[in-house]
């Protein structure tokens, strides 16, 4: 019995290691989306790229536009090549074009390199949650998939800290320090690239391609022998069931079926509301928000590190509550309390912007907002999008829903600098209204998936919409 427990602990430890390795993709995601927060002010200087507010929005959102398309093509590509091989190639792209962004000779080249980096960000944003869902046991799926969110915000915290140090130590006499900030994105790319060689391929991917021997071998690396054999039986049954329903591979024409359309709508709107709740206005433009509320530029750069710290706190809270409280309650808690926080910030902009306490109040409320969002809306949105699609539709389905999420992200990144320059903190009234709409959507459309096997989630949508 003791030897069996040691073996199970070893398998569990290796599974956790594999999860952390694959989450290097999430670090690349977080690092590259947030690196402009702090770097933009240096890029915008006349001696550098001399960016207008509109150009700053394009540089920032160019990556998210690329991510929208990367999400569409990345998931089907992983269905064909495999999750592991696709993530290795994404690591190569992060490495090469991370260096390219740091060496970009002009604004145009920077936008092009950021767009290409965005393709990889979008692909990895769709792929990592799917890979984590497919390698984790059903009872712990929420915890493992939520590691994705933790590592996204971990990457953001890392870049906030690096930017604050580089900006305050070197920025005063070398405005080109933004090149170092952007170029360091190659480091997590190398870790993803090399680390994935030690990871197993997804057993679900093997099973979907009829390679059950390889699926068992993959499972035995991350489960005990008994667990692996039992899970292989479930995989075989799921594949057999899907083959009986339709012997052809999933294609775009399958998405004409009403119940699949409803899954797509559910996943896509979850992404829209999560982005329009405003979190990335803070993560991309946190220093600008803090200076707009009354802080000095150098102080805002250091205080921006707190955004990263509180993001990590929120993500850790989410990891350990998503399988206890459930997906739906966490979403409702998130939208309601985020709305309250955003309205509070907007009210300061309306009635008390020039008071001595206003900057500190805005800072505290934004930190509370970040913890709430990153502990609820962030992880649960990505988790649900990895759960709600049946195996054979997961690649195409998550590609569509993550495309919509990233396009909504693109809109926020493009428009927010103009909103902040035009109406200031009033912008947060808009985000608060979107939070309230998001809460309504969760009540009427979103199923609870806590502890439910992936194969059972399909039955909910079929029973409700397949008529």
Image (cartoon, grey):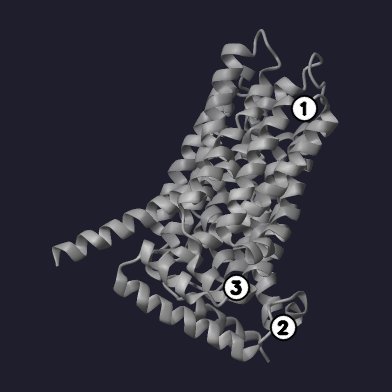
Helix or strand or loop: what does disc 3 sit on? loop
Residue at image point 59% right, 58% down: 127
Helix or strand or loop: what does disc 2 sit on? helix
Q: Is residue 378 above or below residue 345?
A: below
Helix or strand or loop: what does disc 1 sit on? loop
Quadrant of residue 295 in the image?
A: top right
Residue extending farthest to the left is: 2
Q: Real-space Cα distance between discs 3 and 2?
A: 13 Å
Closer to the chain start, of discs 3 and 1, is 1
Q: Horizontally, is 111 left or right of 445 in the view?
A: right
Residue pointed to by mark 1: 104
Camera-side mark, 2 or 1: 1
Image coords of residue 116 (percent x, y): 75, 43
Q: Is residue 369 visible?
A: no
Closer to the chain start, of discs 2 and 1, is 1
Q: Horizontally, is 366 left or right of 315 in the view?
A: right
Quadrant of residue 391 in the image?
A: bottom right
Residue at image point 50% right, 61% down: 201
Image coords of residue 235 (percent x, y): 47, 78
Residue pointed to by mark 2: 258
């Amino acid at each position: 019995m003791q030897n069996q427990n040691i073996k199970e602990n070893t398998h569990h430890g290796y599974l956790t290691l594999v999860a952390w390795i694959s989450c290097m993709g999430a670090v690349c995601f977080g690092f590259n989306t947030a690196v402009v927060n702090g770097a933009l002010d240096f890029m915008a200087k006349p001696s550098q790229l001399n960016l207008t507010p509109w150009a700053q929005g394009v540089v920032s959102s160019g990556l998210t536009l690329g991510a929208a398309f990367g999400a569409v093509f990345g998931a089907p590509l992983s269905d064909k090549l495999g999750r592991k091989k696709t993530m290795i190639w994404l690591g190569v792209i992060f490495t090469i074009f991370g260096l390219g962004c740091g060496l970009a000779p002009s604004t145009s080249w920077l936008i092009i390199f950021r767009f290409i980096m965005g393709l990889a960000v979008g692909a990895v944003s769709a792929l990592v949650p799917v890979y984590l869902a497919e390698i984790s046991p059903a009872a712990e799926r929420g915890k493992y998939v939520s590691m994705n969110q933790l590592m996204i915000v971990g990457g953001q915290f890392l870049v906030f800290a690096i930017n604050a140090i580089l900006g305050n130590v070197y920025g005063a006499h070398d405005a080109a320090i933004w090149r170092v900030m952007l170029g360091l994105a190659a480091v997590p790319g190398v870790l993803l690239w090399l680390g994935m060689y030690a990871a197993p391929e997804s057993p679900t991917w093997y099973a979907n391609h009829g390679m059950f021997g390889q699926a068992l071998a993959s499972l035995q690396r991350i489960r005990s022998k008994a667990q692996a054999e039992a899970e292989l039986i479930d995989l075989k049954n799921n594949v057999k069931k899907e083959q009986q329903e339709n012997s052809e591979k999933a294609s775009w024409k399958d998405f004409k079926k009403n119940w699949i359309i409803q899954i797509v709508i559910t996943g896509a709107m979850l992404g829209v509301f999560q982005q329009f709740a405003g979190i990335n206005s803070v993560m991309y433009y946190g220093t600008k928000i803090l200076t707009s509320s009354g802080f000095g530029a150098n102080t805002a750069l250091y205080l921006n590190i707190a955004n990263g710290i509180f993001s990590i706190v929120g993500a850790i809270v989410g990891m350990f509550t998503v399988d206890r409280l459930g997906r739906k309650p966490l979403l409702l808690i998130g939208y309601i309390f985020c709305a309250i926080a955003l309205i509070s910030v907007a009210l300061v902009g309306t009635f008390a912007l020039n008071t001595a306490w206003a900057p500190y109040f805005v800072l505290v409320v934004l930190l509370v907002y970040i913890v709430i969002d990153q502990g609820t809306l962030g992880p649960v949105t990505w988790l649900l999008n990895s759960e709600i699609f049946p195996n054979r539709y997961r690649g195409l389905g998550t590609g569509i829903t993550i495309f919509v999420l990233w396009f909504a992200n693109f809109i926020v990144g493009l428009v927010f600098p103009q909103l902040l320059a035009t109406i200031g903190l009033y912008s947060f009234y808009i985000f608060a209204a979107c939070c309230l709409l998001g809460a309504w959507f969760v009540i009427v459309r979103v199923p609870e998936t806590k502890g439910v096997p992936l194969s059972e989630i399909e039955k909910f949508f079929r029973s409700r919409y397949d008529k």
